[in-house]
């Protein structure tokens, strides 16, 4: 037995794959809860400070930092139900639009830290690191950044996704322009009009946001590829017989048909694309045995 590969034992590859995906669901659930906790904790600290000073709490949401943390917490909250379902089904996935909200929140939170270290800390150290801002601007973004990379559903972010993820930055810049420059109801919190003309500062901040988004995209995609490669290597050797893979995929289809709602056909497409790419198979070569296994299991359940 010790000389055999994992793939030589019928059903072991499938069980190992399922256990990995279940562990991934637990990890995603944990990371999402951590993200929500620290994001809301940072916002709560700001609310307490404003309340103690007798300031209008609405002013807290003039800050990009507060809105960035709110968006990040919102994105992570949407992932939690899918992670819980993933634990039950051993198959964690969630819609691309949810992933984009999560990604966009991550971009905004990271931009807060980068902008603080690169600009605000030199112009106004107290605003950068004073009171709860040390947590909001540094510790919270770092913790959320780490948590973001623990949540993966097989998506690969594109250049277009990176641009879309910076839309909240642009929207905030437009609102800031109106409220600070045109209307004058807001204080120039970020000193955007003191050193450079605002239209120059606005362009630079948007470019900085895009740079952060592209950097996160590159790192996320790279880590996802590495994790998937390691997972496949742990399941099967590189020279595994394609027939064995199809047998295991058939068994995976039977498992999913047995444990999921038979009214809905669930297919782990991202897993198939990664397997087909790594082992030089066509996706349809995996879809067919998975579908047969799923139907067989459904038929057995309903007699």
Image (cartoon, rainbow, N blue to C red):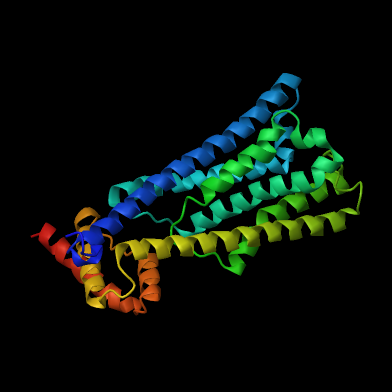
Residue 223 at what x, y percent from top left?
A: 51, 60
Q: Position of residue 171 (x, y in %)?
A: 71, 53
**Above or below for 292 versus 256:** below
103 and 15: which is toward the camera: 15
Relative placement, left or right, of 14 versus 54 is left
Is residue 40 or residue 150 the one in the foreground?
150
Residue at image coords 60%, 50%: 106
The residue depicted at 62 percent of the width and 63 percent of the height is 162
Viewed as shown, does residue 177 lie left or right of 47?
A: right
Looking at the image, residue 2 lies above or below residue 144: below
The single residue placed furthest to the front in the displayed view is 3
* Relative side of 281 to 34, left or right: left
Name the residue at the left extreme: 303
Residue 146 coordinates in the image, percent (x, y): 55, 47
Q: Which residue is drawn at 64% across and 28% down?
A: 45
Percent position of residue 147, x then y: 52, 46
Q: Is residue 96 visible?
A: yes
Q: Quadrant of the C terminus?
A: bottom left
Q: How many marks?
A: 0
Quarter of the image containing the N terminus? bottom left
Asked if one can make out residue 81 in the rendered structure from this viewpoint, the answer is no
Determine which quarter of the picture holds residue 269. bottom left
**On screen, residue 236 above or below 15:** below
């Amino acid at each position: 037995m010790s000389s055999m590969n994992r793939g030589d034992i019928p059903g072991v590859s499938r069980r190992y794959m399922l256990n990995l995906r279940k562990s991934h669901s637990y990890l995603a659930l944990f990371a999402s809860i951590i993200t929500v906790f620290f994001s809301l904790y940072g916002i709560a600290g700001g609310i307490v400070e404003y309340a103690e000073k007798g300031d209008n709490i609405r002013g807290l949401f003039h800050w990009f930092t507060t809105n960035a943390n709110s968006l990040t917490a919102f994105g992570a909250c949407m992932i939690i139900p899918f992670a819980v379902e993933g634990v039950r089904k051993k198959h964690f996935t969630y819609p691309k639009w949810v992933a984009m909200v999560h990604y966009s929140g991550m971009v905004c939170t990271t931009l807060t830290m980068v902008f603080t270290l690169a600009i605000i800390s030199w112009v106004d150290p107290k605003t950068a690191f004073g009171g709860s801002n040390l947590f909001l601007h540094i510790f919270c973004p770092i913790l959320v950044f780490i948590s973001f990379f623990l949540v993966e559903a097989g998506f690969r972010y594109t250049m277009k996704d990176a641009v879309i993820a910076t839309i909240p930055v642009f929207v905030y810049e437009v609102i800031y322009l109106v409220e600070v420059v045109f209307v004058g109801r807001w204080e120039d919190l970020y000193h955007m009009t003191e050193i450079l003309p605002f239209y120059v500062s606005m362009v630079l901040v948007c470019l900085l946001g895009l740079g952060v988004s592209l950097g996160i995209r590159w790192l996320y995609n790279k880590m996802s590829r590495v994790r998937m490669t390691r997972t496949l290597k742990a399941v099967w050797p590189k020279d595994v017989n394609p027939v064995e893979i199809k047998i295991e995929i058939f068994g995976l289809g039977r498992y999913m048909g047995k444990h999921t709602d038979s009214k809905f056909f669930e297919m782990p497409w991202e897993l198939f694309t990664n397997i087909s790419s790594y082992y030089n198979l066509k996706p349809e070569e995996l879809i067919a045995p998975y579908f047969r296994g799923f139907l067989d299991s459904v038929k057995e359940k309903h007699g």
